[in-house]
Amino acid sequence: ITEVCGAKRVGYFGPAQFYIALKLIAAAQSGFPVRIESIKNELPLPRFMALKNDSEVRYGTPAEIHGVKFQVPHANLEKNSYKRTDEGDKQEPKSPPMSPVCSPPASPSTYQRIPLSYGYGKSRSGLEQQHGAPYEVRHPTHQQEGPSSGNYGAKPALSCSTLNRSLSAEREQQDSSTHYSDDPWRITEEQRDYYINQFRSLQPDLNSFISGSVAKNFFTKSKLPIPELSHIWELSDVDCDGALTLPEFCAAFHLVVARKNGYQLPETLPETLLPEYLQAASLKPMRDCTLFDSYSESLPGSQQTRDFSRTEVRRPEEVPDNSALLQDAKKDDKQALKVSTALKTIPKEFQHLTVKTAAQESNALKARPRSRSYSSTSIEDAMKKGEEPPTPPPRPQKSHSRASSLDLNKIFQQNTQAVRSGWLPPPPPALPPRPSVSQTEQVSEAELHPQMNRNPSQAEENSSAKKEVVLAQPPSKPARRKLRTEAQGLETPELSPTINVTSSLPAVKPHLPVQKQSSKQKRAIQTAIRKNKEANAVLARLNSELQQQLKEVHKERIALETQLEQLRPVTVL
Amino acid sequence: VLVSVICSSPQNYPLYIRSVPTENELKFHYTVHTSLDVVDEKISAMGKALVDQRELYLGLLYPTEDYKVYGYVTNSKVKFVMVVDSSNTALRDNEIRSMFRKLHNSYTDIMCNPFYNPGDRIHSRAFDNMVNSMMMQVC
């Protein structure tokens, strides 16, 4: 299977390979031969770890390998489960059919490499439970719910973020060692958002505590027996101060959710629920949780959720570069601020942007777009709970900013300068170590070209910002070694209008229709700033790498000189 | 060597009893219960200083067994009584004090739990774990 899906060829399991592999596993388990053609059939979900499996044929178009589509239904379910109050019938994955593809999320959710997806399944079941439906939670639960999750209307951005996260989780194989699919103690994005909202309802200030009595009343509502609640409290109140901070509250809530789903309470607090763990997220990409405190302090409360989700998302991808991650986090911070100030359409745009890019680039694992999707997702989550999940936006979204940039040429003139200057290095904070410095240099060259071409036309400013966004995306794709192609790939899907303007740009893709929205302007500004910061980060990294090389060269030189010295007396007669 | 621990309320009923399983467990229970009288005596006698880490030192109670019973009282009149086997008596005083301190800390942690009502039996697993570790370590 590994060979067939192409993992052997490329040397790793990228999203495409992963999904193909899952389908092949399902095929093999169903008795089909392991061949590419067999995944074209309707297949039941693959069975992992001898779990009872949902044998419903949930796989949609087998040809649809793009992870984002898989994740869309998955994430959709997550969102909807929050809003549901009648989860009793969720046990069977026979949820109303939604859009095409849905099964893969279930598989990934059980797969070891995608703990976050698994977490989705868990949270889903947890939320359902909370709504009162008795549920026998077994391991297959999430698997069954995976497909059912696919059957809900969804927010594409959320799915994108899910996809991105899961994809990155795939790539970050070292994460998988701690994230086995059976881990019910991880808090997923939606769960975290939900907990935070609950926290806010009890205590508006997210930095402060929930007192013991308030928490007691709250958790008593969960109808768990008092001794169990007492034990949950003991586990989650790590500092034993009689009050719950937000991470402690999240941990407690998560334990309640798990308990209601039938999981036995652990004797000690799982590592993933420790407050330090929940708080130290963004500083350590390996970690699950986000930079809780810093974000909550820097942002208004309503945006905190978004930041959490964003940093959470970013975490798995940016293992190789902590500094870049931090910078990204900060950039996203600012971005979040701006986004929050922007209209609600902006989140949608972000969503659409991420969805679009993800759809266009199957291997896209982009920190930036991901975070944007997260921010938009959380905004939407927080504010649009009752709204219809937007359908995946068409390409035009990108052009919105472009159009607006056209309208605001003068405004963005200054930005252009900044954008151009910051344009030089590719913004790949998530760029795995494989693409070396040379690649970044190449990318910078590639980017310089479009940049030069853009100089004359101010209309390109926003598009250059977009391009930065786009360019940011490919670097994270390990499959793309050639930056030229990356840049091209980046540019083509996203910046077609721009490309048309700049002849030197390797243009390929169709035009993105231009739509004008005032929010685009702000978004463009934010994007530009963010890109600049990314560029700074990349430059700094590049600099450090070069310094390193210089040091090594120096060392070599010194070694050679000493050798020479040693040899000289011998030669001297 | 720590044999038994009891934590009793201000009203002198036990909140928590734990012993090393031996055939004389009941005897230990009886011992600690009677020692509560001695504790009360000391409390009333002392007046101000209510917190004394080692209020009760019996030494040899019976010739057949030498064990010592130590007592400890918190500010809220919650009493801890510990029975230790006197194999290593010489080294024991500070250790006893530290053990009582640990017990007291665990007890305050329990009190912090809003789901715990003062006066309830203590079912806390964390508390159990702590006592277990103390018993193991002493042994």
Image (cartoon, coloured by chain):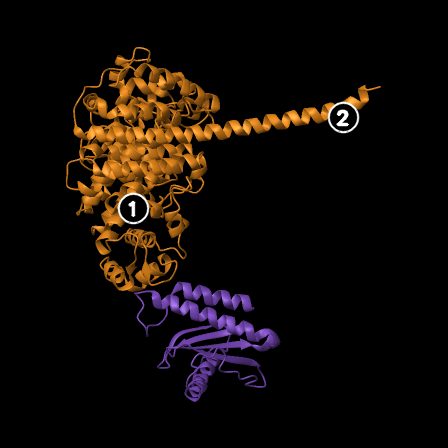
Chain colours: A orange, B purple
Circle 1 is placed at which residue position? Answer: A192
Q: Is residue A250 visible?
A: yes
In the picture, residue A202 is in which quadrant?
bottom left
Q: Position of residue A239 (x, y in %)?
A: 39, 59
Q: Which residue lies most toward the left here?
A: A387
> The residue marked by circle 2 belongs to what chain?
A
**C-alpha span from label 1 to label 2:** 65 Å
Compared with B9, A423 (above or below) is above
Q: Is the same chain shared between marks 1 and 2?
A: yes
Q: Nearer the viewer, mark 1 or mark 2?
A: 2
**Looking at the image, which residue is at 32% across and 64% down?**
A227
Q: Find residue A566 and name its label.
A: 2
Asked if residue A403 lies left or right of residue A269, the reply is left
Q: Position of residue A476 (x, y in %)?
A: 39, 27
Q: Residue A251 versus residue B18: which sits nearer the camera?
A: A251
Q: Position of residue A31 (x, y in %)?
A: 36, 27
Q: Position of residue A473 (x, y in %)?
A: 35, 26
**If the image is split into quadrants, where does the C terminus of chain A sit?**
top right
Q: Residue A209 versus residue A360: which sits nearer the camera?
A: A209
